[in-house]
Amino acid sequence: MQFLLALIVVGPLIGAVAALLPAPPGLKGKSPDQAVLRHGVTVTGVILAAAIVLALGFDHDHPSKIQATTDISWIPALDVRIHLGIDGISLPLLVLTALLTFLCALYSYFKMPSGPSPKAFVALLLVLESGTLATFAVLDLLLFFLAFEMVLIPMYFLIARWGGAQRTQAAWKFILYTLLGSVVMLLGLLLIGLRAGTFDMVALATDNDRELSTSVQVIAVLAIGIGLAVKTPMWPLHSWLPDAHTAAPTVGSVLLAGVLLKMGTYGFVRILLPIAPDGMETFAPYLAAFAVVGIIYGSLACLALARPGAKGDLKRLIAYSSVGHMGFVLLGISTMTPTGVNGALFANIAHGLITGLLFFLVGALKDRTGSSDLDTLAKESGAALYGRAPRLGGLLAFGAVASLGLPGLAGFWGEMLALFGAFKPADELSRPAFLTFMAIAAFGTLLTAAYMLVVVRRVCMGPTAEPSGAPKLADVHGYEFAAWTPLVALTVLAGLWPAALLGLTDPAVQQLLAGGKS
Amino acid sequence: MTAAASTASAVSGAVESSASVIQSVDWVAVAPPTIVAVVGLAVLVTDLFLSERNKHLLGWISLAGLTAAGLFLLPLTDSHRSTFCLSGPRATACSYTVDEFTLVIQLLVIGGALLTALLSMTALKDARSTDKELPEGEFWFLLLSSAAGAALLPASRDLATLVVALEVASLPAFALVGLRRGDKRSSEAALKFFLSSVTATAVTLLGVSFVYAATGTMHLTELGEKLGNVDGQLDTLAQTGVVLTLVGFAFKVAAVPFHFWVPDTYVGAPLPVAAYLSVVGKAVGFTGLILVTVVAFPEYADVWGPALAALAALTMTAGNVAALRQRATRAYSAVRLLAWSSVGQAGYLLVPIAAAGYADQRSDVLEATGATVAYALMYAAVNLGAFAVAALVGRTQALNRVSDYRGLYARSPLSALVLAFFLLCLAGLPPGIIGLFAKVTVFSAAVDAGLGWLAVVMAANVVIALYYYLQWTALLFRAPQGEPVKHRVPAPLTVAIAVTAVLGVALSGAPQLVLQFAEQGVR
């Protein structure tokens, strides 16, 4: 088991190096470009298979136990250890990452984004995968920071080299925001590590007579929280996200929304909740308040973008909707109750699946029509995708209703549990405040429904027989079906059978919140 | 230079006791600096007999000499030897000691000189083909003498040898800076460097004489014991002496307010010399500072501890803010940026020494100075690498502006990747893992010593520095202006870049190699 986990983390890195080397004889393919793209599909496929095997071999009776652990001393001078392991919280995220990266590699194999050589593209994609998988698998604070930073460079280049208009500025803004955030986070991590005498997350989480005083915890939570909140992103630190999403290539957007944002919320659950509960308690009401503002702000921004004549970009709109969805995740975490945190983790996965799908769909739409601008697409009456490309339109409508939280689909459970958590927050927290937050957040779901339906109406509906004779669009290709079907299927599955996921996360969350006692 | 050491120790020895003047010398212990000095003299003599065509042989001789000196460090590992000791009853003080600290710094100095020599071979060859010729015999002689002084310094354990070694390391450096004949900038830089350095040396000498007057000894270990019980009347004299001595070393590390010479000197000097000054010159200053503060003046830790902490904060802030204000299009801005960044890095290097002033236990002191040594080793490898790439770019872009690095990736992908790695190491960001962890050790040294405010200042500086390092790094990967032209990279330069890159990557994979010094201290 531990070899499998080590392979999952290191495998993509080796694959990245191999991608830069010339292809060995027998694997040359039709052209060097095709060979390297195929290499990307193979490596991510192997990693996905390994992740699935790992999930099957995972002891589902004890999901709160850290499994498949590797623990090697790396830098004794600083007591940094290569400590890997997974539990019910990280396993779903690990599988989601492996799945989304594989689908992205598959999609790029057929539809390489325009830009320089695919060699570097595949290598960067694999480094990105390794960094994200490592973030979810490491159990050492400094390694967590390293993994957290490791994804920045590939993402920067994916945006700056294969992106659309304004890509240089967007990439620069992305790296500057997240870097500054993570440097602040590093200071918080160092504070915890130096004060407690260890960087080991498991030891820190289970150490019940902690040496961390409340004031240290408060400072640490503030510092680490800022770093994670930039990544999540929490309003008002979100402004890099819409730019980055708008400029990024389809694959970059999918991974950014589907996986990278989850690293921030995962950090909240994995580091802040168990290690600095006192500090977290101080900031939980503020976090919840910012989260709720984010929900409303994201929805209002989307509504404004969806208006006719607003020149709203669809990618930008989905990015803003991510701010709102991540607001629910943060609200769930800030309740500090098992219900809320479970809801947050569920919403995390659901958002990864649904938003990943939506970015794929918008990317495909942009490839076909040359624009993702809502006004250009819809003109006066609507883009009429139902008529011009019925399957694409149907999928887009599916993604939209899943995103607005239709019961029976994945988006529903997470947000509902987060609201439940806010209804009855942890005993130390002020209930009236959280009831207010709950009410506002619930209003946010209505707004979400409103803009999503506006988008569906403007993009999918409309008169098919336009006087100007809109060109017929190519409907969903085979490879697109292959890349999207897993996401659709999992969205439905998670919506109909939420227990599969909650059964994994719940025991682990219970243990984390109880300070290591199960 | 060895002669100087022996005279110095003989003089102070004669003061202590009038016992036998004839000593046996442990030649193996003194071999590394001696070899460097002897080869330097040999090069100077050989230069007279070589025709213009064969001058390039001098470079190879120097390289061989430095390599030999490096190899002679090997038999000394795990040993603790002393020579030029006081004779007579109860005399334990020695002028020349080889211990782990000495060896690590000597390795740094000789390695740094070796890499400088590699850079210089290309620079001299390029100079030969233009009219701005550099006199080769003199160049190699000066470089080797300076390196010999720098290698002697970590081993010296009395103030006279220390000052002599410091001057042996510095004086040739002035000449190296001004070596470009007929270049106004070069001579101006040399003059600036010379005047400020000589002032600092004079002040140090005054301080040393005060300390000697107050205690009657030159040996660092004896000073450490005697300074504690100085006669009440001489107390002020001793204190003044301590402060004045430190001033000289503060100049060598280019601490505020002695940092103004750095950018002009680096720009005026031939690039390899600037690289040498930024690494070996700094190492010399730090070694001296550690020896003087921790070994000789521990009694005055409450004086120099806070003073160094303040200097560290000011130095890193001044360096980083000035680097931030560099315009990318100004002539020589790349070298200027590296110069200011080296001032900022010097600030980080000062932090653990200041922390040592606050330590209660001997082991804490050793750990703190070990953090400086670990950081210095990281900095040496990475900064020399950055200068090596700058030298490479400087061959085609004579003005060496930061904006000339735009699109370097398209022109020569490997050197761009390597430079990006070096810059990220200096910034302390992954994948420059060693830079990150070296900064973490320095940071934790400050926190352990209770210098929370200094840790905060350092954190703010790291963030400032991030901006300009990152901007430069991002520039490497921008689209180039105009057609990229490929150039052949000369072999010595390739070797230098490759060696530093391999060192950086290896240390990033196994940071323990240098960080062990921060854990156990350098004994």
Image: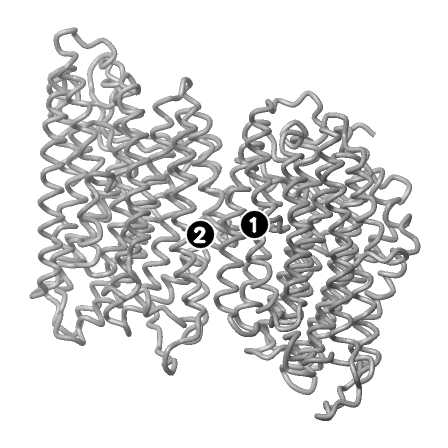
Q: In the picture shown, does residue B196 fall above or below A52?
A: above
Location of mark 1 (residue): A237
Circle 1: element type: loop
| Residue B368 visible within the image | yes
User: Residue B138 at what x, y percent from top left?
Assistant: 12, 59
- Residue kind at label 2, given as amino acid type: Cys
Q: CA distance from mark 2 to mark 1?
A: 27 Å
Location of mark 2 (residue): B425
Residue, x 75% and y 53% (percent of image)? A94
Name the quadrant containing residue A400: bottom right
Circle 2: element type: helix
Chain under disc 1: A
Closer to the observer: label 2 or label 1?
1
Task: Report the quarter where the C terminus of chain A lies.
Answer: top right
> In front: B8, or A247?
A247
Q: Is residue A149 left or right of residue A40?
A: left
Name the quadrant containing residue A199: top right
> In front: B453, or B421?
B453
Q: In the picture shown, does residue A263 fall above or below B497?
A: above
Residue, x 21% and y 40% (percent of image)? B252
Residue, x 58% and y 40% (percent of image)? A224
